[in-house]
Image: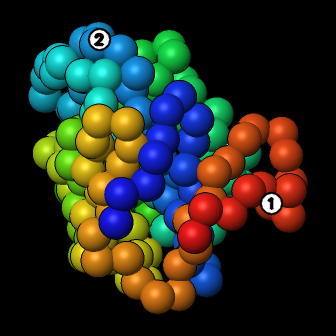
Amino acid sequence: MHVPLGEGLLLIRGEHSFLLIGKAGRRYALRFETFEKEYSETVEPDDLIVVSGPEGGSVEAAGMLLELVRGNHIPLVILPKGHPGSKRLKMVVSVAPEILLACDIQRGTHPEQHLLCSSGELAGMRISGAEGGVEIERMPPCTTVEYWEPGRYSGDKQQYI
């Protein structure tokens, strides 16, 4: 399914979790920090920045996190597998042209940006950046898609689907 998206944000809600999606908008280098090294990857304008809230939580906070990555290019920290802090992460971020959602990976520990930890209800979805929008594949029937603007309550959002 193709969903038009410019500079705004798209919210996909499940019954207990959500994804907040934005496009990078311009080309820049994004740094990744691991315990062993630091490296950079080029982010292209149509690449996606996706914040996953596997347990739900504040969409407003997810929007702030997305903007810190998109507007300020804050580095993404990748924890080693088994790190105790992983279970305390309420939200995780991925930046890539295409992102596959999985519930069987540990939060914050996957260095490949094409995989993002999600809830079981959103697992298996594939989200791709496309010219003028976003392609969404394998979207579960329990989900809704809407445009989201910071500072507005959920009931005020314009529902797309």
Image quarter of residue 113: top left
Query: Residue at horizontal 29%, vertical 36%?
Result: 131
Q: Secondary structure at mark 1?
A: helix
Q: Quadrant of the N terminus?
A: bottom left
Q: Quadrant of residue 39?
A: top left
x, y percent for residue 64: 64, 33
- Numbered circle sitting on residue 154: 1
Is 72 on the left-hand or right-hand side of 30? right
Which quadrant would the C terminus be assigned to in this image? bottom right
From what the image shows, is residue 152 above or below residue 56? above
- Residue at 40% across / 21% down in the picture? 25
Q: Please tell me which residue is depicted at 35% across the width and 15% down the height of the picture.
A: 26
The label shown at residue 28 is 2
Amino acid at dot 2:
Tyr
Q: Position of residue 98 (x, y in %)?
A: 21, 48
Tell me if residue 137 comes above or below residue 141 in the rendering: above
How far across and down, in percent of the image, does residue 114 sit? 18, 49
Q: Along the polypeptide, which appears first: circle 2 or circle 1?
A: 2
Q: Residues within 10 Å of mark 2 (few under 14, many from 20)?
A: some
Q: Circle 1: is it few (<14), some (14-19), or many (20+) Cα within 10 Å?
A: few
- Residue 159 drawn above or below residue 4: below
Q: Are marks 2 and 1 in contact (CB under 8 Å)?
A: no
Labelled disc at residue 29: none
Q: Is residue 27 left or right of residue 151?
A: left
Label 1 sits on what residue type? Ser
Looking at the rendered structure, the number of numbered marks drawn on it comes to: 2
Q: Residue furthest bottom?
A: 141
Q: In which quarter of the view is residue 125 placed?
A: bottom left
Classify mark 2: helix, strand or loop. Answer: strand
Q: Is residue 55 visible?
A: no
Whole-angstrom CA distance, mark 2 to mark 1, is: 31 Å
